[in-house]
Image (cartoon, helix red, strand yellow):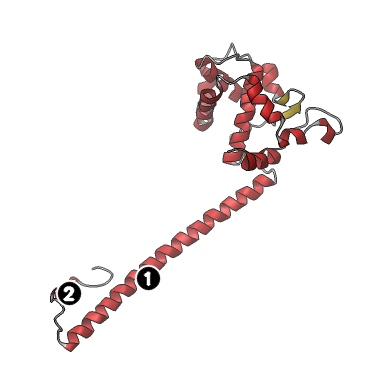
Amino acid sequence: MFYDITTEQIDEIRDFVESGGALPAKDTVTRFNALHAALNKKMYEELAKSRSKATRLEKRVQSLKAREEDRAAAGMFTETVPGLDSLEVAKALAWCLRQKQAYSLNNNKIVAILYEMYSSWLESKHERLFAHHPQATSYGPQFWRVWKKLNVNAVVYGDFSTLAEKNAGIAAFCRNAAEKYYDWKLSDLVEPSKKSAPYRNALPEHNDGKWNAEISDADIYEWRIRNVK
């Protein structure tokens, strides 16, 4: 069967076409036209169903995307791995950078790259990379836990593999970040972030004269989607 048309009926249509346009008996012409109409109707119905399914799917995707955009704009970001420690990600990143023999590797550079990673992940995934928020300091965006506790010379492969077991995607993200930023100067990482709206909005003049205010995830997201190409 083909669209509910039997092989005999298909043969009948073929015979009419192959006749070279010779006019068959009236009842055969009527039969052919009826079969042709039935075939066209079936094909149209299938096409309409297919388009309807595609339209519904497209609308569903658009709806989910709009919902994610609304959540992001409102600052309602979930964590990629709930409770993941920023220090864990920093250690994995530091190990990757050491494999690249990174230029002037120290805690300041790790923090600066980590902020780029945090911002990028927030934009692309609509999720926070880890539990801790960046804070605004006079030196730029800061993750104090990382800056105070990380020893870049003591990281080992186990620091990377432990993260990879929790989330292979974040581990791969660390590798990619190391590949991208290993030879960047610290100033080339920090200065652009200090000029950005998320950082400026967290400065003391907007926070009762105090440093170390959390940099808003919503501000980071909004700035990234509008300004970073």
At label 1, the amino acid type is Glu
Q: Earlier in the sequence, mark 2 or mark 1?
A: 2
Give x and y (percent) for residue 109: 63, 20
Residue 46 is left or right of residue 224, and the answer is left
Q: Nearer the viewer, residue 81 or 106?
A: 106
Query: Of 103 and 44, which appears nearest the observer?
Result: 103
Helix, strand or loop status at disc 2: helix
As shown in the figure, which amino acid type bears the numbered disc 2?
A: Val
Q: Check disc 1 and report the residue beneath it.
A: 45
Residues under labels 2 and 1: Cα distance?
24 Å
Label 2 environment density (alpha carbons within 10 Å; few <14, some 14–19, many ≥20): few
Q: Is residue 82 visible?
A: no
Disc 1 is placed on an element classified as helix
Picture quadrant where residue 54 is located: bottom left
Identify the mark at residue 17; answer none if there is no mark.
2
Which residue does the image show at 68% across and 19% down from the upper left? Answer: 147
The residue shown at (62%, 26%) is 114
